[in-house]
Image (spheres, rainbow, N blue to C red):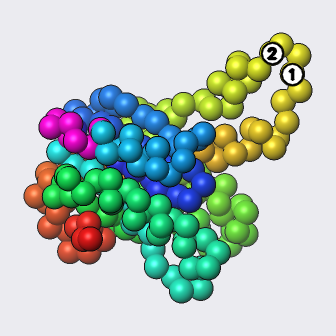
Amino acid sequence: MILTVDLAAKFSAAILRDRAGKVHLQFDSRGMSHFAFAAKVGRIARDPDVELVVIEEVPFNPRYTQVMVKPVFKFQGVLLAVLHPVLDKVLMLDPSTWMRPYPGVQRAPKGYTKTAGDKFRIAKAAEYALSFGYTPPDLVQEFIDSQPEGTRILKKHTNPLEKSKTDYVSAFLMNHFVTSMTEEEFRALPSGVQPAHI
């Protein structure tokens, strides 16, 4: 089985899937500290049936280190520390590498504004996932169902959940990308896949 982790500072999602395409487990970091989420990933990774743990690499861009990626680098360090006992089966995967086989997921066609382009990319990713038989959990509906009857549902509560669904889709597409080849082929990719060096 392959465990893939779509990594972000605010919200991360993980999917455990076998090579036949069955999703055995999916979970996210909502309501968890980075340490608790990393510990859960670590427990699953130590299962002998898990052959690979693939974590989305944080693309390095000096322009964004202070604002966006610095917290993710720290989180990545926590994950790798927890995964130290099984580091031989942990690989880092560059987003541009796993997105390449899914046109429109990394970049919207020319002419789109940033907002429209983001919506296009999100919809395209969901479309690919659905074509492979995957639908992310409906986090918004789960939230609505958990509220007392008559509760006013506010966008400030549902918008983050809509965003979170996209992280599940990304974790699934990463997994689909990895399982489209043998472990040897995946490890031997000329770029975009790195061992987890500590």
State the predominant SS element of the stretch in magenta.
Answer: loop
Q: Residue at x 54, y 73 (%)?
A: 70
Position of residue 100 in the picture relative to residue 30 (left or right): left
Mark 2 is on which residue type?
Pro
Position of residue 187 in the picture relative to residue 196 (left or right): left
Mark 1 is on which residue type?
Thr
Check the image and name the residue furthest to the bottom. 62
154 or 127, which lies in front? 154
* Residue 139 locus on image (x, y percent): 62, 32
Q: Residue at x 31, y 45 (%)?
A: 42
Instruction: Decide: few, some or many residues near mark 2? Use Cα within 10 Å; few <14, some 14-19, many ≥20.
Output: few
* Residue 9 locus on image (x, y percent): 56, 59
- In the image, residue 197 lies in the stretch drawn in magenta: no
The residue carrying mark 1 is 151
26 to 84, vertically: above or below: above
Helix, strand or loop at label 2? It is loop
Quadrant that contains the N terminus = top left
The residue stretch that appears in magenta: 44-50
Labels 2 and 1 touching (C-beta < 8 A): yes
Q: For residue 28, which numbered disc appears in the image?
A: none
71 or 22, which lies in front? 71
Instruction: Decide: few, some or many residues near mark 1? Use Cα within 10 Å; few <14, some 14-19, many ≥20.
Output: few
- In the image, residue 47 lies in the stretch drawn in magenta: yes
The residue carrying mark 2 is 148
74 to 166, vertically: above or below: below
Quadrant that contains the C terminus = bottom left
Residue 105 shows in this picture: no
* Residue 124 locus on image (x, y percent): 54, 51
108 or 31, which lies in front? 31
Q: Quadrant of residue 69?
A: bottom right
Helix, strand or loop at label 1? It is loop
* Residue 19 locus on image (x, y percent): 21, 38
